[in-house]
Image: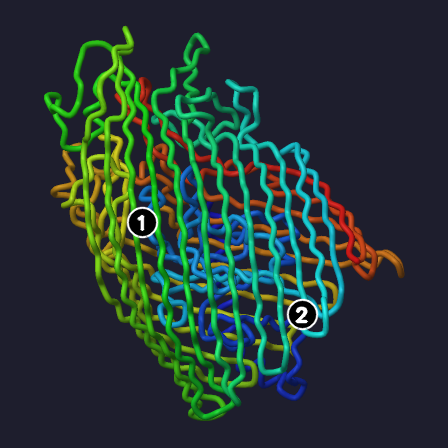
């Protein structure tokens, strides 16, 4: 671990020294510098096409080709290339954290602090984005608040996914992969090209059928098995030079059979096994069934030198997650415990959005973007929870043994609690950004967005059934708790940036900005009532300074930034084992500060190295009423607890990665490409209660390798792909499943994918 910290520290130091030495290097290379740069990356982070090196934002860009090399299926793969970004794996929601800030997965109705955009369409819920992660052009990761131009709930950052579009020439590709460890295949491809002089199209698809990486001893099955079908049709119409319209329609059908949890003792550190024991629960098979549709339409109309852009979006999904939680607790006889906890979360969601913006021409003294945005959504979440415990009332906060809502009798019994949450939300905003080109080298950028959000929510909980475990005596349906709420709020998010070119291809910037995320409702916590149903919006403030440099005619690219981000009223949802419930609300304040750097070197043709690293220090400034941590005294109570000075869970101090690529010409007809990726992070708490025993993931480095043989024109290829080659067993999340909810208290660990080796073949035409 110490060695890993030293590697990351040296990486950041190297980037920083290179960047700050850039002016001297630039003077040496000034005579040779020109405007060409074969390694230039074009992004649309500021709603215009720009070089990444001209954008005054700490951001990383991962190309679709790079993601495809390692068979990307979701947002988690982006972590390998973007330090200070973490995706938490759970059985409910996968949550993105940037600089330590994100929205916990426990409360399903949370809008995310890190917003995901797919071809310009806001996707605030992870199951909206099942289909987009294939056939991509690039993924842009923007760190820090992006309230002005992205706007919708970007308090901690934004991830923009851009899919590949139609091509001007007819082409296509087919790729088939077989995974030896997951015992299954992954087939994908596309066809693209013009249909007429004004119309072009692209059809892409992906079909996956693979087993999992955890052996379920109860079912003799490898969990989680994945079966998915994904398709995207893109049509672009260009009737003239003044107008174009692109329509994209995506469909995703993903079925996950089995879970990713394994049991572990509460008295030892995390040493996850790759076996589990879980039979079919009373709510059906464990897993996740998800069906989604996303449609976007983007039109551009030239009005003289100005451009009017319309972005229309529709998103829909239905999903059902069923959890059983691993039962494996070996004893002296080798038996297993009886499963006592299970839950299911059916969801339904639909959203319509519309954005209009106008862009001024570039190259003027004053450039601007102004626009307006509107969206409307409906969300329904059901929850079924089952227990096999002697005292059901313990699972309902505030209840007592004599509570008339709860049937109490001698002997064990089975019970099921059902709840339903409904939310209708509507938001609109107006925004603008102006750039004053004070000189050829100095620019001042100001932006402002006003957003208004209205939400109405309701929560109903019922004791759906209860029966005596001895004689099966049924008990009638009984209401437990109800809640209703309404939110109407407005937020203003400004930012100011100064940008200066200190030399050709060397830019420094400083920025201040604010972000916000709307308030909301507690969607799936038993015992919720009107007084605990609503939580407040969270707000962020960011100070950042950086330098971006492209040197030696594009052969060296070095960037570094420093930042300080402060959140107020941070929205949290923390598990409380004593009542097997979640404490959801607003923490008072937290601050993250650190440094981020990246370095890309292209020393000789056909060889390049890219490295990135970050150091982050994040702590609560003030958090009264917080759930007690495992390290605090047993006398601690939330009523008197304050976590000021404590670290925030799911955040490492050090993160980093190195990617190296080399090409070898085997002959005039064939070439060999080798790509290696090493990505890692230092230790972090991965449990809500920050247990120093079962809730710490140790530091690690994961290694991926791709070896590919292809012809010189890339018309065909054959590749061997290895992921997590050293078989690091890492845990995305952990929690304590206590008695009497379960007969034997234990830690539940969400195991991330272990080592897997694949062979891939493909061709292009």
x and y percent of residue 236 in the render? 62, 68
Which circle marks residue 678 in the picture?
A: none
| Display colour scheme | rainbow
Q: Which quadrant holds residue 742?
A: top left
Image marks 1 and 2: residues in contact by CB distance under 8 Å: no
Q: At 46% across and 58% down in the image, what residue appears?
A: 314
Q: Residue drawn 48% across and 79% down? A: 308
Does residue 427 sit above or below 577 in this rendering? below
Which tag is nearer the camera, tag 1 or tag 2?
2
Q: Give percent across and percent down for residue 226.
A: 57, 36
Callout 2 crowding tier (Cα within 10 Å): few <14, some 14–19, many ≥20: some
C-alpha span from label 1 to label 2: 51 Å
Q: Earlier in the sequence, mark 1 or mark 2?
A: 2
Residue occupied by mark 2: 199
Secondary structure beneath disc 2? strand
* Quadrant in the picture for residue 327: top left
Residue 580 screen position, x and y as percent: 26, 31
Tell me which residue sits at (48%, 24%) in the image. 276
Which picture quadrant has residue 493?
Answer: bottom left
**SS for callout 1:** loop
Q: Nearer the viewer, residue 34 or 311?
A: 311
> Where 379 sits versus 302, above or below?
above
Q: Tell me if 490 is positioned left or right of 139 in this view.
A: left
Where is residue 160 drawn, in percent x and y?
Answer: 49, 62
Other residues around mark 1 within 10 Å, as few (<14) / some (14–19) / many (≥20): many
Q: Residue 648 got which mark? A: 1
> Eyeballing the image, is 118 above or below 441?
above
Position above or below: 198 against 529: below
């Amino acid at each position: 671990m110490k060695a890993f910290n030293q590697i990351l520290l040296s990486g950041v130091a190297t980037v920083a020294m290179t960047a700050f030495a850039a002016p001297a290097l630039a003077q040496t290379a000034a005579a040779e510098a020109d405007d060409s740069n074969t390694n230039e990356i074009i992004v649309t982070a500021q709603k215009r096409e720009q070089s990444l090196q001209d954008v005054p934002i700490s951001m990383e860009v991962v190309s679709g080709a790079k993601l495809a090399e390692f068979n990307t299926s979701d947002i988690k793969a982006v972590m390998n290339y973007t330090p200070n970004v973490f995706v938490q794996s759970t059985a409910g929601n996968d949550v993105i954290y940037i600089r330590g800030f994100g929205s916990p997965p426990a409360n399903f109705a949370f809008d995310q602090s890190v917003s995901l955009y797919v071809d310009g369409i806001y996707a605030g819920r992870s199951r909206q984005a099942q289909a987009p992660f294939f056939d991509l052009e690039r993924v842009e990761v923007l760190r820090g608040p992006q309230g002005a131009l992205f706007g919708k709930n970007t308090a901690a950052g934004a991830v923009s996914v851009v899919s590949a579009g139609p091509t001007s020439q007819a082409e296509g590709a087919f790729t088939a992969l077989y995974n030896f460890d997951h015992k299954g295949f992954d087939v994908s491809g596309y066809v693209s090209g013009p249909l007429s002089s004004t119309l072009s199209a692209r059809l892409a698809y992906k079909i996956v059928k693979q087993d999992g990486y955890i052996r379920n001893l109860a079912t003799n099955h490898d969990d989680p098995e994945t079966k998915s079908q994904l398709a995207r049709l893109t049509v672009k119409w260009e009737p003239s030079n003044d107008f174009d319209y692109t329509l994209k329609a995506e469909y995703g059908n993903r079925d996950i059979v089995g879970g990713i949890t394994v049991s572990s003792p509460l008295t030892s550190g995390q040493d996850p096994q790759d076996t589990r024991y879980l039979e079919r629960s009373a709510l059906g098979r464990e897993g996740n069934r998800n069906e989604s549709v996303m449609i976007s339409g983007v039109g551009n109309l030239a009005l003289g030198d100005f451009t009017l852009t319309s972005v229309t979006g529709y998103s829909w999904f239905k999903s059902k997650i069923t959890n059983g939680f691993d039962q494996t607790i070996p004893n002296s006889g080798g038996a297993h415990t009886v499963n006592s906890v299970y839950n299911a979360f059916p969801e339904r969601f639909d959203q319509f959005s519309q954005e209009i913006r106008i862009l001024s021409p570039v190259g003027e003294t004053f450039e601007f973007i102004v626009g307006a945005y509107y969206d409307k959504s409906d969300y329904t979440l059901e929850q079924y929870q089952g227990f096999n415990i002697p005292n059901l009332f313990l699972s309902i906060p505030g209840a007592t043994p004599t509570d008339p809502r709860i049937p109490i009798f001698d002997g064990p019994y089975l019970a099921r609690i059902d709840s339903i949450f409904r939310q209708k939300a509507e938001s609109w905003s107006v925004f603008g950004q102006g750039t004053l080109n004070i000189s050829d080298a100095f620019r001042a950028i100001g932006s402002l967005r006003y957003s208004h959000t209205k939400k109405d929510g309701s929560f109903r909980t019922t004791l759906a059934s209860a029966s005596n475990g001895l004689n099966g005596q049924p008990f009638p349906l009984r209401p437990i708790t109800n809640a209703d709420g309404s939110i109407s709020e407005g937020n203003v998010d400004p930012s100011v940036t100064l940008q200066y070119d200190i030399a050709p291809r060397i830019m420094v910037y400083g920025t201040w900005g604010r972000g916000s995320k709307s308030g909301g409702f507690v969607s799936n916590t038993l015992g919720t009532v009107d007084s605990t149903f609503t939580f407040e919006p969270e707000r962020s403030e960011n100070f950042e300074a950086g330098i971006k440099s492209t040197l030696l005619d594009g052969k060296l690219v070095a960037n570094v930034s420093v930042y300080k981000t402060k959140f107020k009223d941070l929205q949290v949802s923390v598990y409380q084992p004593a009542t097997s419930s979640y404490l959801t609300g607003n923490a008072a304040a937290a601050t993250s500060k650190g440094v981020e750097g990246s370095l890309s070197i292209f020393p000789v043709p056909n060889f390049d190295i890219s490295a990135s690293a970050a150091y982050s220090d994040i702590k609560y400034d003030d958090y009264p009423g917080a759930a007690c941590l495992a390290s605090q005294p047993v006398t601690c109570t939330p009523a008197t607890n304050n976590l000021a000075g404590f670290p925030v869970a799911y955040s490492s101090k050090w993160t980093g990665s190195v990617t190296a690529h080399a090409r070898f010409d085997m002959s005039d007809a064939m070439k060999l490409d080798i790509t290696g990726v090493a990505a890692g992070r230092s230790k972090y708490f991965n449990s809500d209660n920050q247990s120093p025993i079962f809730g710490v993931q140790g530091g690690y480095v994961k290694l991926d390798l791709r070896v590919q043989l292809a012809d010189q024109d890339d018309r065909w290829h054959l590749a061997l792909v290895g992921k997590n080659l050293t078989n690091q067993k890492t845990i995305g999340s952990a929690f304590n499943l206590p008695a009497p909810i379960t007969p034997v208290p234990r830690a539940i660990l969400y195991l991330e994918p272990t080592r897997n080796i694949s062979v891939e073949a493909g061709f292009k035409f």
